[in-house]
Amino acid sequence: MAPTLYSFRRCPYAIRARLALQASGTAVELREIVLRDKPAELVLASAKATVPVLVLGDGAVIDQSLEIMLWALHRSDPQGWLLRDTVAMDDALACIAEKDGPFKQQLDRYKYPHRYGLPAGTAPREQAAAFLAQLDQRLRKKTGLCGTAWCLADAAIAPFVRQFAATDRGWFEAQPWPALQRWLAGFEASTAFAGVMQRYPVWQPGQAPAITQFG
């Protein structure tokens, strides 16, 4: 029985979960939702009531995107996203933690300043830029964030860099981050990204299961 994935196409957390499911070759029953009209089934499955949520065949629920990524890759990791070197893997997880913490908070305030009582998003943008500059320095040395190949850190962080860049593409492209800009362009042009960004009808209770293997 395939696990059930509640997802929303544009959500960066859901994108990174789908990337890992795709990389691992895991098929799921996809339930594409609209966040402003959440189905009761999603709320029942997870108290946080937002995507992504993965419901396994035995009823167990994984409702954190990074945990979904790790679950999928521990099942199957043909591309070697889980780095075998312990130091490298610890570095990847630390980089993800910085993105999921300070950078994500700054990104939200940059993209939606009025939600946080800010007149503009300029200050949080400058704060977030420090992290992006660090990523650029990493990518000047290697083609991936933690090595020569795409890994867990790249997949976990790229959807959020994409969201940041899209907020003001002209500003992003004007920054002295050539390696980061190439890395993001490669991600956006990849078959993997295209595979997880296909459009699906919004799920309706009672409909026949739609088993999906992204890409």
Image (cartoon, grey):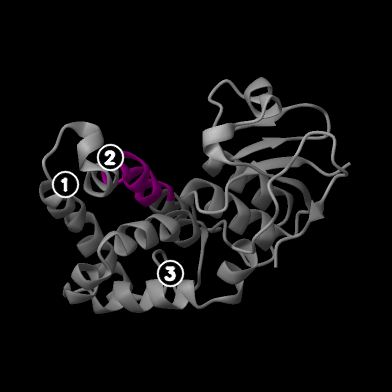
Indicate the secondary structure of the residue bearing disc 3: loop
Type of residue at label 1? Pro
Q: CA distance from mark 2 to mark 1?
A: 8 Å
Q: Main secondary structure of the magenta part?
A: helix
Q: Residues within 10 Å of mark 3 (few under 14, many from 20)?
A: some
Indicate the secondary structure of the residue bearing disc 2: helix
Q: Earlier in the sequence, mark 3 or mark 1?
A: 1
Q: CA distance from mark 3 to mark 2?
A: 27 Å
The residue at which mark 2 appears reads as 105
Q: Earlier in the sequence, mark 3 or mark 2?
A: 2
- Say which residue appears at 67% left-offset and 20% top-offset: 44
Residue 177 visible here: yes
85 horizontally vs 169: left or right: right
Q: Earlier in the sequence, mark 2 or mark 1?
A: 2
Q: Quadrant of residue 186?
A: bottom left
110 horizontally vs 80: left or right: left
The residue at which mark 1 appears reads as 124
Question: Quadrant of the image for the N terminus?
Answer: top right
Residue 64 visible here: no
Q: Which residues are magenta?
A: 93-104
Question: Quick check: marks 2 and 1 in contact, CB under 8 Å?
Answer: yes
Q: Position of residue 38 (x, y in %)?
A: 60, 31
Q: Position of residue 24 (x, y in %)?
A: 70, 58
205 horizontally vs 163: left or right: right
Q: Quadrant of residue 49?
A: top right
Q: Which mark is residue 147?
A: 3
Q: CA distance from mark 3 to mark 1?
A: 29 Å
Type of residue at label 3? Gly
- Say which residue appears at 78% left-offset and 41% top-offset: 3
- Say which residue appears at 21% left-offset and 41% top-offset: 113
Nearer-the-camera pick, 198 or 84: 198
